[in-house]
Image (cartoon, coloured by chain):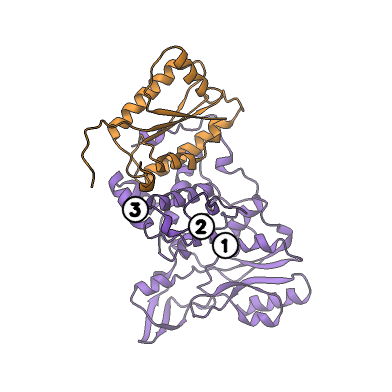
Chain colours: A orange, B purple
Amino acid sequence: MSIETNEEFRPKIVAFCCNWCSYAGADLAGSSRLSYPADVKIIRVPCSCRVNPMFILRAFEKGADGVIMCGCHPGDCHYSTGNYYARRRMTLLFSMLDYIGVENGRTRVEWVSAAEGVKFSQTMNEFVEKIHSLGKNVRLEDLRCRS
Amino acid sequence: MQELINRAKELLADGTVARVLGWKAGDLPYNPEPAYFETEESLKDFVYNGFCGANLSKYMIEASKLEGKTLVCLKPCDTYSFNQLIKEHRVDREKAYIIGVGCKGKLDIEKIRKQGIKGIESISGAEITDEAETLTIQTIYGEKTCAYKDAMLERCHVCKGKEHKIYDELMGESKETKDADRFAEVEKIEAMSPEEKFAFFQNELSKCIRCNACRNVCPACSCRKCVFDSNKFDSAQKANVDSFEEKMFHIIRAFHVAGRCTDCGECSRVCPQGIPLHLFNRKFIKDIDTFYGEYQAGEDTTSKGPLTNFTFEDVEPSIVAERG
């Protein structure tokens, strides 16, 4: 049962951004006055490799509608190889989420360097649009966490 | 079996080993349990039959810390787990004397029960020396029979092979039992629509009572401190748990063993609710095989695991969406 409201759906998006590239990319997007939706909440992590698969599931549990992970381009990692490991992990996790019936597209990985403010804002706009079209995340949500 | 007991007695007597790790008869004819035997007399309780499905590799983690060598009986599939534990430095090869025991496929009591055989008093034909193709089961309702093949554990139908990967000596004969493709079930689920997949897993995982049996039995789940034991994680009790946390528990557990899971099938065997947990592990194995090349955990003790390794040309995570 749900109460009909006329409120527009505002997705909650969590973006894990690595400290060295993507977070700086987001910064550049801001200082270049490029806009990206306020629905995106950025969480800064030391490296994309720091993103434990559980972080992503936890975010969904707590009510996120989409989770995006941004890191340095492969080969550019501040710690040399972190994002290569992250890439393998995320491929397997996304495949598993697809397997248990979570819609494709709720999760995404994008490599954004510190110089790519434009790419950052573009990616976020695209992703928010995608989540808009998918609607609310009901499959991975924990009802107790609903506000 | 007698041959095995005699050899164990010999090794205990000459001091090569300080204890024997095997199975002893349980309180019912079909539930032998893992046990230590420290004296020759106690070996009279030793059993090894078709119901000895338990993988003893994990017990060697604790046994490696004990004084003296431990004689451990490993079935062909258990040796994969043992190898994997050596690779992870969890067991000490020097502390183990491995007798590779033969295996003709292990039995699943639930499969026998599903055929309507209830009130079991005794079962014959499950002995390792028996050549019988059928089990003769004495029940309180009279004698019943059941084909050995129909009572076999799911994992034995997709057996990895009867070759022991690591051993000090071999004993007993094995019989090939593989007659199915291990990824067939996974492929069937992959072909479903997202709604069907979700309904399928919701249905299966909502049965979970969070007894943690799958975690406790898993040879790959050998962390000293487990993430699920945290009191910050509300999953310690079933009452607290929302349907999502069951999924989270099983996804994360499968993820933590991804690339290390030897597909020994213990998780599905011990699940009191009969949840096909191997489907998660096999999905990861299948993905690893397709994305990063064929890999069998526990095949050797030196190769690098797929998740602790990478290549510059790895596929991007977007492949999941692209392949549809």
Placement of the N terminus of chain B among the 4 image quadrants: bottom right
- Label at residue A17: none
Residue B144: image x %, image y %? Answer: 37, 82
Identified by mark 3, the residue type is: Gln
Q: What element carries label 2?
A: loop
Residue linked to disc 3: B202
Give residue B137's quadrant in the image. bottom left
Position of B277 relative to A14 (above/below): below
Q: What element carries label 1?
A: helix
Specify the subunit that label 2 lies on: B
Specify the subunit that label 3 lies on: B
- Label at residue B76: 1
Placement of the C terminus of chain B among the 4 image quadrants: top left
Residue linked to disc 2: B160
Q: Residue at x 38, y 87 (%)?
A: B140
Identified by mark 1, the residue type is: Pro
Give residue B32's quadrant in the image. bottom right
Residue B320: image x %, image y %? Answer: 39, 36
Residue A97 as seen in the image, left or right of residue A133: right
Tell me, yes or no, whether the two marked residues, 1 and 2, touch with CB atoms within 8 Å: yes
Residue B220: image x %, image y %? Answer: 57, 54
- Is label 1 on the same chain as label 3? yes
